Image (cartoon, rainbow, N blue to C red):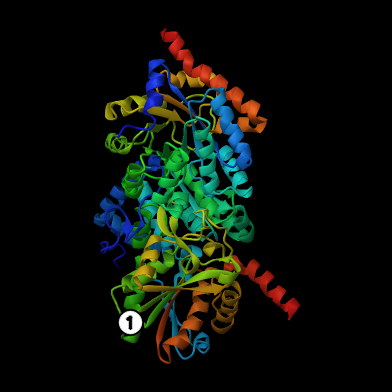
Amino acid sequence: MVTVQPATAQPDARGHFGRYGGRFVPEALIKALDQLTAVYADARADPEFIARLNGLLADYTGRPSPITEVPRLSEHAGGARIVLKREDLNHTGSHKINNVLGQALLTERMGKPRVIAETGAGQHGVATATACALLGLQCVVYMGEVDTERQALNVARMRLLGAEVIPVKTGSRTLKDAINEALRDWVTNVDTTHYLLGTVAGPHPFPVMVRDFHRVIGLEAREQMLARYGRLPDAVAACVGGGSNAIGIFHPFIDDPGVRLVGFEAAGDGVDTGRHAATLSAGEPGMLHGALSYLLQDSDGQTIETHSISAGLDYPGVGPEHSWLKDTGRAEYRPITDAQAMDAFQLLSRTEGIIPAIESAHAVAGALRLGPELGPGALLLVNLSGRGDKDVDTAVKWFDLLEEHS
Amino acid sequence: MTARLAPLFEACGADHRAALIGYLPAGYPTVDGSRALLRAMLDGGCDLVEVGVPYSDPVLDGPTIQAASEAALRAGVRLRDVLSVVESIAAAGGRAVVMTYWNPVHRYGVDSFARDLAAAGGLGVITPDLIPDEAQDWLAAAQAHDLDRIFLVAPSSTDQRLAATAAATRGFLYASSVMGVTGARDVVSSAAGTLVSRVREHALGLPVGVGLGVRNGAQAAEVASFADAVIVGSAFVTAAGAGVPGVRALAADLATGVRRHAAQLA
């Protein structure tokens, strides 16, 4: 199993994907980013590092994750055949563990004893707390106060794993503010601390490094599709918040021109309501959290507060490589509302016995709309990035509300 | 071209003292209120004011400046208000630079912002999250509109980066005295003196200002003993709670501090 591949043409040596990416951070962090870049370059050329990471991915995470065709769900997709990539079956319940194990090994390699992370839905926080427990690293997770409430189960999981969870009470009290607080911690404690960023955003080298650690999703899926169906899928779908699971499954298909790449963003109450998190659909290029990328911002360059029922997609920025893929036309990005996502959440649960994370339900909802466009017999690969145990409380509230009004 | 701030540092040098630089965000507590507070800083003895651009995601700021920025944004401050505050300072004979995270300038248009700031009488821009490596647009605009570009260095900066950052800087180099975010501290970090010595090896003749943590005259005197400028931010934001008299009194205390070293030398 090959998990770390040589980088393709993007980004350039300074982390630019076309005009996007780069490093828009305080000078105080540059030394640490340079160190991380160098240690990562060294590690990916080190067979021992690769063997250790692959060993963990196989024996600890449970990779490769299977693909599952879902015919009863596909009945609602206009004749297209939907195939799920089952990242929900990974240890800790989402794709996040792929990147976390890679960066945790790099932390060890750098000799840093302390890890900090941000989390939205809590999936990245849980994965980070897990890896820190495994490797004996101190772990602090910043989580917006709003998210600690709507994802209380994951807060408990992180604490069980020995991590300190710090609720962030500034700004919108969601993922964006958790990242701000993690960056403030990092600039203060950078000598002893690695910031284990959980998505393909942030300053170079995070977007390329996190992508590389998640490419395993697409590499496996590509082989699995060829082995089972004898051909590549017609389209690949994924949800996009920061964009880590999407880039992980998209990237190995970028050079396959016959494969459409479609990302589904959180449209909240609807893109036209202003209460959404559909960055690529409604944003403009700007800097947030260290990179130039599409951004939900006002006419003065202030970040706009977002809304999504999904804590993991409730973010006004997006990884710079997605901005580049959008501008070049190689990938397309579409909005999915809270209601559409929750309908798909329920439909997948009832037709296939798979309860998805609400984040991943956005990709399922997108696939149900994309299917009819692709036509009968089309193969549609959907990244089921996480499972929905953490979302049961939200789902109970959502569907009870609907029943009261029906 | 000569730095716009060169006359200030020449005058302070002739007095054998460090310059005193005070920061407050524009629009805090209101746009007019911030005009009065910034005027009070100059009246109290600041040689230069940094007019801060309130920003939604100030990752290099501690709780004091975060809270002030949030309050200013809630009160509706816009970037054009910041420019008008600079204009009123300059019209009254004061020296002002702008301190801003980069996205508001990027959104406004880098060249447009430089043009409008220069027209308002501003002398330069301090850029806490813009490093010279990413600053091609800004360096060109600053050149075109004759503005100083004030970059930051930190205790973690390598010698190579100190040299490269100093080479891109005009006006003065802003040395962060500690690894961390803004906020008043009880003790001036020992890292500050070390950093300034290192900077002087790589930035011959470029004035060096030290910021992050200074809050009173005694600390100002200590920093003034090794730096060309003492920069005070969070302490002024706190003093702004006591209005114009509070800000003027702090400025006067700090102004005495930066002169104490000169008095000892005399």
Viewed as shown, does residue A97 lie left or right of B159? right
| Above or below for B30 versus A78 | above
Q: Where residue A92 sits: x, y (%)? A: 49, 62
Task: Between residue B58 and residue A127, name the one nearer to us.
Answer: B58
| Above or below for B253 versus B238 | above
Q: Is residue A135 visible?
A: yes
Q: Quadrant of residue A187?
A: top left
Q: Quadrant of residue A237?
A: bottom left
Q: Label 1 amino acid?
A: Leu
Task: Between residue A54 and residue A320, name the one nearer to us.
Answer: A320
Q: Where residue A5 sits: x, y (%)? A: 27, 63
Residue positioned 37% across, 68% down in the render: A327
Q: Where residue A88 sits: x, y (%)? A: 48, 70
For the C terminus of chain A, give its image quadrant. Answer: bottom right
Q: Chain of mark 1?
A: A
Task: Between residue A197 and residue A392, name the one nearer to us.
Answer: A197
Task: Between residue B129 and residue B46, name the one nearer to us.
Answer: B46
Q: Where residue B266 sits: x, y (%)? A: 42, 7
For the N terminus of chain A, give its image quadrant. Answer: bottom left
Circle 1 residues within 10 Å: few <14, some 14–19, many ≥20: many
Q: Which residue is mark 1?
A: A232
Residue positioned 65% across, 26% down in the render: B245
Viewed as shown, does residue A188 lie left or right of A152? left
Residue positioned 63% across, 61% down in the render: A150
